[in-house]
Amino acid sequence: MTSVYLLPALSAGKGVNAKVTASAGFDFSPYRFTIYPVRIGLATRLERSHIAVASAGALFVDNKPVFALAPRYPYLLQHGYISELATGRSYKLPHDRRSYIASFDRQVWANNRWYNGCLELLVRGQRITVINLLDLEEYLGGVVPAEMPANWYPEALKAQAVAARSYAWAHIHIGAGSTGAGSKWYGSEGYDLVPDVRDQVYKGLAVRARSSDNAILATHGIVLQDSGRVKPGFYRAWVGDAFENFNMRKSTISNALLEKITGIPKIIGVTVKHWDANGNASSIQIIGAKKSREVDGIALAKMLHFSTAGILDARQQGNEWIFTYRGPGNGSRGLSQHGANMLAAHGWPFMLILQQYYQEPGGHLRFARLAGYDPGAYFRRLPVQKTKPNIKKNDEPKVDISKMDEPKADEPKKDVSKTDASTDDSKTSDSKPEDSPGE
């Protein structure tokens, strides 16, 4: 038996919507309206970091713009200052309070990726922590397609959205008094979650997909509940990032070679702007000190002689760039939810799928909806390429769920090759799934 109802106790922590006094031509708040703000630690106590904004923006201190930021130009955070690389002009960051980087279109660049929301800056001595501040539902837009392929069945994506939302809510500090563990990072580092499998994989704007956005909207605010608290939605990963490396390859490319191939001098950022439904980087932004350009990710992989076109990420290490890309024979990325996708293919609704994996010993699972959300009022859709499930339709008669033997979560995996979202030349492995994120 399942039930869904409003849970008023979960509405603690009002969103920030501070009104900024206009100055220097800026008449917007550093925050987009947030009902449940989430802080993601993108860079922790670094000696230097780079940031940028997609449209006209500013550094805000005490909700006032104090340092104008030009769009698509990189800025350096170092020695307690923010400096514009192209001109050298700078501004001293406050050490006794948080400052904010925001742009008019709410798109910011840090940690080599583009994100929604704004950036919070924490200066501690000579080191800087960069935090992405945004609403919980927008955060899920960069999590769900990173944890489950966006071309899987809609009900499986909905189940993933609820699990990811439940995990996030149970691990942010605003819910600590009423929902359980709260953030394991906030007390020491000042943010709620990290963007990798220690919590949940979060890849920002590049991974956003319409199918995942629709799944988030369709389950707006719904979380798993257990004895009046939100049940953390732990789940197992099939393949993941550096902490769960499986059939991933790494290649070291010199900065000089990358500059020669791309024609961009003094490269300081290599950012994946979009992954396609198969997990290949289809657009990569090369950012230099004075100019930048976008290149085709598949073409770049061929020019760098990678064994596949599946570039997943790039990071700088001294005067070299470390590219991570999918090895041959592995086309599936993200969450170990092949079972959920199989059930969705047989017509199971997302609530029944979730009950299969999270039900209590008595066979029950209850849901709650976080109070305060208006699904159509604020969630921003991006113009992304439409994706379709790369799965053969089931030609068998529709299965009667009530008569179907429900597979157990701890049973050995069955052959799910017919429900795999990978391409024909990229088969998944039979390797055992890893542990849940955050466990």
Image (tube, rainbow, N blue to C red):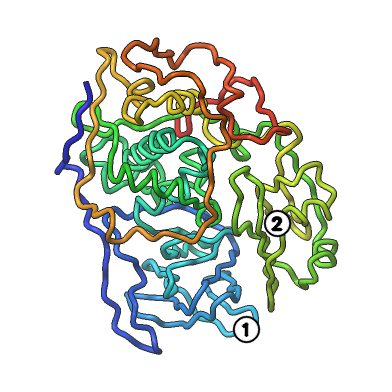
> Would residue 155 be visible to someone looking at this image?
yes
- Quarter holding residue 29: bottom left
Report whether 386 appears left or right of 320: left
- Quarter holding residue 21: bottom left
- Asked if 318 appears above or below 231 in the picture, the reply is below
- Asked if 437 appears above or below 19 in the picture, the reply is above
Q: Where residue 88 sits in the image (x, y, percent)? A: 62, 83
The one of 364 and 299 positioned closer to us in this rendering: 299
Which residue position is annotated with label 1? 88
Number of callouts in the render?
2
Report whether 162 appears left or right of 330: left
Q: Where residue 243 sits in the image (x, y, percent)? A: 60, 36
Looking at the rendered image, the disc whose residue lies closer to the viewer, 1 or 2, is 2
Q: Where residue 132 sits in the image (x, y, percent)? A: 44, 58
Residue type, numbered disc 2: Gln
Residue type, numbered disc 1: Gly
Q: Which residue is drawn at the image coordinates 44% and 63% (left, top)?
A: 122
Query: Which image quarter is the C terminus in?
Result: top left
Q: Where residue 280 sits in the image (x, y, percent)? A: 66, 47
- Quarter holding residue 162: top left
Secondary structure found at label 2: strand
Q: Which residue is drawn at the image coordinates 59% and 62% (left, top)?
A: 47
* Disc 1/disc 2 C-alpha distance (Å): 22 Å
Which residue position is annotated with label 2? 316
The one of 147 and 324 positioned closer to us in this rendering: 147
